[in-house]
Image (cartoon, grey):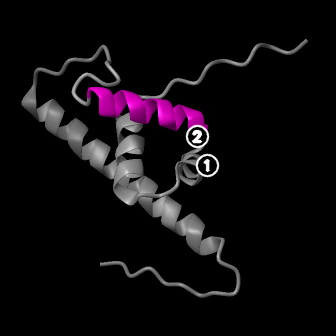
Amino acid sequence: MTEPQKRRQYRREFKRDAVELLLRKGKPRGELAVDLGIRSELLNRWKVEYLTNKAASFPGTVHLKDPEEERIRKLERTLRTVTEERDILKKRLLCSPGQLHEIPVH
């Protein structure tokens, strides 16, 4: 007997970062969804919610009162975004057969 599949949950920051990446890069939704490991329809639903009311989108239960904690969370969110973008670029380079690409590191 197989167990029912659990519903995956995504953090608010991941959802916002995914939508912002979609809006910034202008990459096709389906392609970005594959890169992030989520369904295209889910990314579209997140985009609609984000564009409808950016401030209230993806409500969570955590409310930070310490400014230092908030700063750390913002830095962690930025790091996740940059890491995801880097991983996407690495995948793109590996998928380009017969071409040698280098990514400059500063």
Residues marked 2 and 1 touching at CB (< 8 Å)? yes
Left or right, 57 with respect to 84, comes to left
Q: Quadrant of residue 12?
A: top left
Q: Quadrant of residue 99?
A: bottom right
Q: Amino acid at mark 2?
A: Ser
> Magenta segment, principal secondary structure?
helix
Q: Is residue 12 visible?
A: no
Foreground mark, 2 or 1? 2
Whether 76 is drawn above or below 88: the answer is: above
Tell me the SS state at disc 2: helix
Q: Residue furthest right?
A: 1
Mark 2–mark 1 Cα distance, whole angstroms, equals 8 Å
- The residue sitting at 23% across, 46% down in the picture is 75
What stretch of residues is rendered in magenta?
39-53
Q: Amino acid at mark 1?
A: Val
Residue at which label 2 appears:
40
Given residues 64 and 59, the one toward you in this image is 59
Residue at which label 1 appears:
34
Residue 40 belongs to the span the image colors magenta: yes
Quadrant placement of the N terminus: top right
- The residue sitting at 21% across, 27% down in the picture is 55
Whether 69 is drawn above or below 86: the answer is: above
Quick one: label 2 or label 1, which is nearer the N terminus?
1
- The residue sitting at 31% across, 19% down in the picture is 59
Q: Quadrant of residue 46?
A: top left
Q: List x then y, in percent, for residue 44.
A: 49, 36
| Classed neighbour count for the residue bearing mark 1: other residues with Cα under 10 Å, few (<14), some (14–19), many (≥20) | few
| Classed neighbour count for the residue bearing mark 2: other residues with Cα under 10 Å, few (<14), some (14–19), many (≥20) | some
Whether 65 is drawn above or below 18: the answer is: above
Residue 1 belongs to the span the image colors magenta: no
Tell me the SS state at disc 1: helix
Given residues 33 and 91, the one toward you in this image is 33
